Amino acid sequence: MATRIRLRRVGRKKVPLYRIVIADKESPRDGRFIEIIGTYNPKGTTAAQKIQVDAEKARQWISQGATASDTVQSLLRQAGVFAGEVAGRESRVASS
């Protein structure tokens, strides 16, 4: 089963709120999902209010082969989920 990390809208009309979920690739946007790993509130004022994600669960799912949508990948970078991996790549390139 191919899994994706993507957004699921749960907010009401004119007040968007999204959950960051692990879902089967074939499931509809607001359909069945496997696990909730965080939330995204685009109307939040600070970065901490906008993105709340369980980084350990995100890393675990990515290591198991889940692919993140473009939007979620950007959000995970902002939340610092990929911080260790990016730093590791840059240090290997610099040392070569």
Image (cartoon, rainbow, N blue to C red):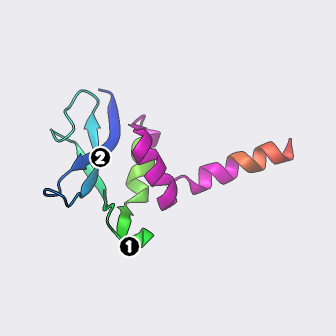
As drawn, 48 above or below 91: below
Quadrant occupied by the C terminus? top right
Q: Quadrant of residue 68?
A: top left
Number of numbered callouts drawn: 2
Which residue occupies the extreme front position in the image?
A: 14
The CA distance from mark 1 to mark 2 is: 20 Å
- Viewer-proximal residue, 34 or 17? 17
81 within the magenta span: yes
Q: Is residue 20 magenta?
A: no
What number is the disc on residue 7? 2
Judging by the rendered image, the residue that carries numbered circle 1 is 45
Q: Main secondary structure of the magenta part?
A: helix
First-in-chain label (1 vs 2): 2
Q: Which residues are magenta?
A: 62-88
Left or right of residue 20, residue 29 in this image:
left
Q: Residue at x 26, y 54 (%)?
A: 18
Residue 36 image point, x, y percent: 26, 52
Horizontal side of residue 45 vs 81, given as left or right: left
**Amino acid on which disc 1 is placed:** Thr
Neighbour class for label 1 at 10 Å: few (<14), some, many (≥20)? few
